[in-house]
Image: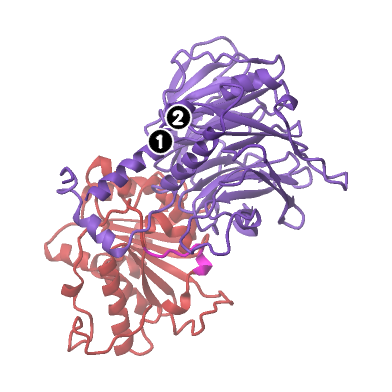
Chain colours: A red, B purple
């Protein structure tokens, strides 16, 4: 999957070896409701770690299964956050999930180029083209993730399209399933209406609780939310406001 | 372009076909058959048909799900008319009429009979509180469901409660089975997912819990468009065994092409002690009988119970918990030709029972019409007429198969075809074909 192309790739910058975005332009939105035509693992252990993290898994057989993906960036876009997280948590496996195929292709090339120019680095990060709203349980087991990111998701303003929003009361049930107790869900948007929506979904969910301001300030990841992604930088350039909601997965109080 | 138009037109006709369904009262007091919008009931105790009392005049479109509650006190029906009707089986009056926003695909009644759940075509499961119902003669309640959980934009094919009532299980078109804790107060949603049972490679079409006194929690069996029945430890989501029923029934040919559509499993029914499972499969005239071993967690084929005199491929099967009879129905709603409209065929297999004490297999046979309890009067009511022409069978089987495939199997288009469809959308779709 992540075979490396030659340095003289015409879609890559000659000076940095990184792919150039203008060759990977895509529509800004993708319909998450349409039937998908890409391969999806039937269950999480079918996901081939050796294709995505060859340095961690030199053999296709992942019989030990000891190390698993812990961070998931849902709708990773051009991958800015992943790249920053990769060096901040060099021993944690992380994956970006993106529905737009050209954008996924860009992130894939970007990671390969970074691995080539920084040997030993960026080996813990990868990307997959998928519809995370539909197939999260196909990739991750119960309680596998420690962090999930939802950065600048599609706002879907029309009420009719609210069910396309990536944060919704029912989808939070699935996110709570793949997050382990104590795991953190990070959301940020520049659309106030969506910020209010995401916060109210999380506030209303029995398996999430808001994280206090002090804890947030001490978390190095929080700063990356607005600075690391392409979308975040664009908002900052235009002097826009951002609205973030960061919540912790808590144990259930459900008694049998 | 013309091609495209035709295809969509055909598909519309086909997806409107709904299979005939059968439900058996837990003590076999009543047998219910639905076909199209028609709900037929027979009282086995007094040997007569039952007249349903519904102020709103019954269902208006194809019924997609019918269920008795655990004690048999309640009966529920729902379908394409976006209505869920809950009936009291003493008076056979409709006591709740629930309006859904979308078409309803499946139903389940909680073990304590306090809640009725239904799933719609957009993957949302709703819950209706029926605790305030009492037997006193009172007016029909018109109400709405409260969202309980959701499979993201997938069609939910089946809903089931675990035998202990702790979990609600949902199966969908995207190969998934989800096991969710059913809270004591479900009106604020069921948020805690216990597991996903993943392994099917096509839509999941049916579910059945297998439990016994020794294994009260039991196991879960599922049937699918991938032509298998799978056995699960549903609390952990682990796959225990897979039985390739399509291949074992001899429905798959050695020269089967890779992309050919496999005969789907359409329905499952387990005996009350869980040791036997009847499996209805598309293209199989009769049923396949499986043995489930709850201590070794395995499934094995006992035999195929064939129906030879006529091409009877059941569209739905059911059994009571106390009588060793398996009830089967075959039929389809709204076929193009009106001659066969709303005819259903009912057959019964005897010897459908657990086999814990005896070493000899109970005698399993397909009953002749005159051997069926209450024979002719029952068939007259449930089938619509006593004898049904052979042509009706093949038409019904084919129509149900096509509509199920169109509804649940994802279409595979070539890259060129996909490009073509992309170009043809929005601005071009309203043009009339040349």
Q: Residue at x 55, y 79 (%)?
A: A61
Residue A190: percent from left, percent from top: 21, 56
Q: Chain of mark 2?
A: B
Residue occupied by mark 1: B16
Q: Residue at x 15, y 58 (%)?
A: A240
> In this picture, is B173 found above or below A74?
above
Q: Which residues are magenta?
A: A38-46
> In this picture, is B404 found above or below B19?
below
Residue occupied by mark 2: B62
Q: Quick check: B415 left or right of B199?
A: left
Quarter that holds the N terminus of chain A:
bottom left
Quarter that holds the C terminus of chain A:
top right
Residue B428: percent from left, percent from top: 16, 49
CB within 8 Å, label 1 to label 2:
yes
Q: Quick check: B352 left or right of B246?
A: right
Q: Is residue B78 magenta?
A: no
| Residue B168 visible to an observer of this rendering | yes
Identify the secondary structure beneath mark 2: loop
Helix, strand or loop: magenta stretch: loop
Cα distance between the residues tagged 1 and 2: 8 Å
Identify the mark at residue A130; answer none if there is no mark. none
Q: Chain of mark 1?
A: B
| Residue B43 visible to an observer of this rendering | no
Residue B139: percent from left, percent from top: 49, 11
Q: Is residue A44 magenta?
A: yes
């Amino acid at each position: 999957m992540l075979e490396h192309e030659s340095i003289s790739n015409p879609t890559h910058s000659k000076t940095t070896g990184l792919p150039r975005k203008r060759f990977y332009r895509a529509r800004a939105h993708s319909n998450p409701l349409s039937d998908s035509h890409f391969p999806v693992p039937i269950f999480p252990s079918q996901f081939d770690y050796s294709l995505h993290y060859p340095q961690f898994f030199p053999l296709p057989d992942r019989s030990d299964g000891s190390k698993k993906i812990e961070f998931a960036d849902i709708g990773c876009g051009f991958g800015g956050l992943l790249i920053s997280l990769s060096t901040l948590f060099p021993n944690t496996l992380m994956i970006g999930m993106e529905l737009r195929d050209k954008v996924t292709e860009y992130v894939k090339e970007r990671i390969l180029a970074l691995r080539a120019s920084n040997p030993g680095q960026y080996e813990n990060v990868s990307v997959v083209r998928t519809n995370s709203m539909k197939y999260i349980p196909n990739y991750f087991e119960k309680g596998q993730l420690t962090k999930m990111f939802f950065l600048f998701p599609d706002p879907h303003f029309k009420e009719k399209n609210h069910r396309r929003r990536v944060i919704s009361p029912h989808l939070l049930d699935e996110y709570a399933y793949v997050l382990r107790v104590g795991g953190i869900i990070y959301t940020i948007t520049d659309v106030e209406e969506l910020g209010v929506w995401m916060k109210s979904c999380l506030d209303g969910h029995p398996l999430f609780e808001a994280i206090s301001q002090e804890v947030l300030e001490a978390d190095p990841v929080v700063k990356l939310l607005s600075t690391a992604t392409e979308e975040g930088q664009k908002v900052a350039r235009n002097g826009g406001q951002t609205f973030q909601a960061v919540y912790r997965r808590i144990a259930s109080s459900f008694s049998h | 372009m013309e091609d495209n138009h035709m295809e969509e037109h055909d598909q519309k006709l086909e997806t409107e076909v709904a299979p005939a369904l059968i439900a058996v009262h837990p003590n076999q007091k009543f047998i219910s058959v639905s076909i199209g919008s028609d709900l037929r009931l027979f009282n086995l105790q007094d040997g007569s048909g039952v007249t349903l009392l519904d102020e709103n005049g019954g269902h208006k479109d194809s019924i997609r799900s019918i269920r008795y509650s655990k004690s048999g006190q309640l009966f529920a029906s729902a379908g394409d008319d976006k209505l869920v009707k809950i009936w009291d089986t003493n008076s056979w009056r409709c006591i709740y009429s629930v309006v859904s926003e979308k078409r309803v695909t499946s139903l389940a009644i909680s073990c304590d009979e306090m809640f009725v759940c239904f799933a719609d075509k957009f993957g949302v499961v709703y819950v209706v509180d029926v605790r305030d119902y009492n037997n006193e003669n009172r007016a029909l309640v018109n109400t709405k469901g409260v969202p309980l959980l959701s499979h993201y934009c997938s069609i939910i094919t089946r809903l089931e409660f675990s035998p202990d009532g702790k979990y609600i299980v949902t199966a969908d078109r995207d190969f998934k089975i989800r096991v969710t804790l059913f809270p004591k107060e479900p009106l604020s949603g069921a948020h805690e997912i216990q597991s996903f049972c993943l392994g099917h490679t096509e839509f999941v079409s049916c579910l059945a819990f297998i439990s016994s006194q020794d294994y009260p929690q039991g196991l879960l069996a599922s049937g699918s468009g991938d032509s298998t029945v799978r056995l699960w430890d549903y609390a952990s989501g682990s796959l225990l065994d897979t039985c390739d029923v399509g291949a074992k029934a001899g429905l798959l040919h050695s020269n089967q092409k890779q992309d050919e559509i496999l005969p789907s499993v359409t329905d499952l029914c387990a005996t009350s002690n869980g040791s036997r499972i009847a499996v209805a499969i598309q293209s199989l005239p009769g049923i396949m009988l499986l043995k489930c071993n709850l201590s070794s967690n395995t499934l094995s084929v006992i035999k195929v119970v064939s129906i030879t005199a006529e091409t009877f491929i059941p569209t739905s099967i059911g059994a009571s918990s106390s009588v060793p009879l398996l009830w089967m129905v075959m039929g389809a709603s709204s076929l193009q030709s009106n001659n066969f409209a709303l005819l259903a065929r009912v057959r019964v297999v005897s010897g459908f029972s657990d086999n814990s004490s005896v070493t000899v297999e109970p005698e399993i046979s397909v009953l002749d019409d005159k051997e069926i309890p209450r024979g002719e009067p029952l068939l007259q009511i449930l089938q619509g007429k006593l004898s049904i022409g052979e042509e009706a069978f093949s038409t019904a089987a084919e129509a149900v198969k096509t509509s199920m495939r169109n509804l649940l199997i994802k279409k595979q288009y070539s890259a060129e075809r996909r490009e073509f469809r992309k170009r043809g959308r929005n601005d071009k779709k309203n043009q009339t074909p040349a």
